[in-house]
Amino acid sequence: MRRYARITGTGSYLPPRRLTNNDLAAELAQHGIETSDEWIVERTGIRARHFAAPDVSSSDLALEASQKAIEAAGIGAQDIDLIIVATSTPDMVFPSTAAILQHKLGITNGCPAFDVQAVCSGFVYAMTVADSMIQTGAAKRALVVGSEVFSRILDFNDRTTCVLFGDGAGAVILEASEEPGILSAELHADGSHVGILCVPGNVSGGKVLGDPLLKMDGQAVFKLAVSVLDKAARAALEKAGLTDADIDWLIPHQANIRIMQSTARKLKLSMDKVVVTVDQHGNTSAASIPLALDHGVRSGQVQKGQTVLLEGVGGGFTWGAVLLKM
Ligand code: UT7
């Protein structure tokens, strides 16, 4: 009998400070940066984003989302035997945000905890790693989180990027089960595109060397994203012996509505089958897929037994898809 990793609970959290496009445009205007609600909505579909308070870190957002996922799964925090956090905005250089989260959750069972760094594809990478560890018997009950405070790495003098991103966290509990859960996964990276989306700075000799703010060639990222996502989705479907027609819900990385529309079109899915939350929180990098998944579950759209395709794309360049039964 195959041992599956099945989602038994989801949770998410957005920090309370919400800025609409008009709020952000007004703040940027004070520094001579011009943008507008019309431009942002038309080019991206984003209407608002949330920014964490200065003293709030990725592990704090992760804690809120994790507690909700743990409650939804009906388990106790001590039952968790693996923690993986996908983040590009960790609390510290080290230790991992996952280890910090373990302590904040009060977990004292010594379970492994580590971070996965695959930028906006981080959640599909983390789910794939957790799935593999559950399938091999290395873990029974994993907490998988995507959590980001991207506001910390935004250049608010660069209107081409600072209007796109926000902060937030999403989490799932993945449990070993004989009932189908994750059916297949497909991960990729192409490091030749490092420069199109990166934060080039690093910490060295007590100083930050290089630029610690996000740089993106938006058009290059857009073109790559729309050229790889449907292929990854198809490969995941093929591995599971399914086709486009079997997908009940597409839950894509929430970066830009136009990228989501393009992928849906290529997979012959109507937008009614796509969970869209980018309008409410912008691009939250590794947090965006679990945020959208939790929204889909809690709004009653995504139901037990349905077939769901998660797909992510981002810096690295990285991309991937996870196909699962809820
Ligand atoms: O999570 C990782 C994945 N990241 C992504 O998926 C991002 C992918 N890329 C994109 O979503 C899009 O490329 C953007 C939303 C970033 C940009 O949209 P675009 O349609 O490619 O716009 P563009 O870069 O071609 O810029 C068009 C115009 C330019 O003005 P000119 O040169 O035509 O006069 C920009 O200067 O829009 C201008 N512009 C803005 N105007 C108002 C750029 N940013 C802004 C802004 N407000 N915030």
Image: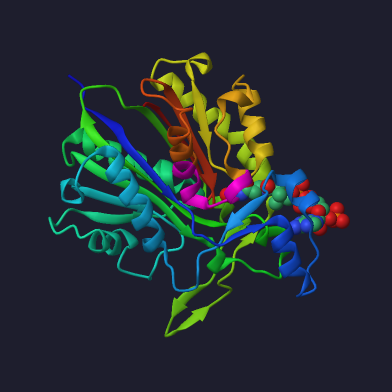
State the quadrant of the C terminus: top left
Q: Is residue 271 left or right of residue 75?
A: right
Front residue (pair 140, 194): 140
Tell me where the magenta segment starts and ends, as one range: 279-291
Front residue (pair 78, 267): 78
Q: Quadrant of residue 27?
A: bottom right
What is the x, y in percent for residue 316? 52, 52
What is the x, y in percent for residue 305? 36, 20
What is the x, y in percent for residue 110? 14, 57
Q: Is residue 206 above or below residue 213?
A: below
Predominant SS along the magenta part: helix
What is the x, y in percent for residue 284? 53, 52
Is residue 67 one of those drawn in magenta? Answer: no
Q: How is the image coloured?
A: rainbow
Q: Is residue 126 visible?
A: yes
State the quadrant of the N terminus: top left
Q: Residue at x 47, y 15 (%)?
A: 246
Q: Residue at x 57, y 41 (%)?
A: 277
Q: Is residue 52 above or below residue 293?
A: below
Q: Quadrant of residue 160?
A: bottom right
Q: Residue at x 34, y 62 (%)?
A: 97
Q: Is residue 219 visible?
A: no
Q: Residue at x 50, y 69 (%)?
A: 53
Q: Is residue 11 left or right of residue 3?
A: right
Report how many numbered discs are placed on residues in the image: 0
Is residue 289 one of those drawn in magenta? Answer: yes
In the rendered image, the residue lying farthest to the bottom is: 206
Q: Is residue 137 left or right of residue 309?
A: left
Q: Is residue 140 above or below residue 315?
A: above
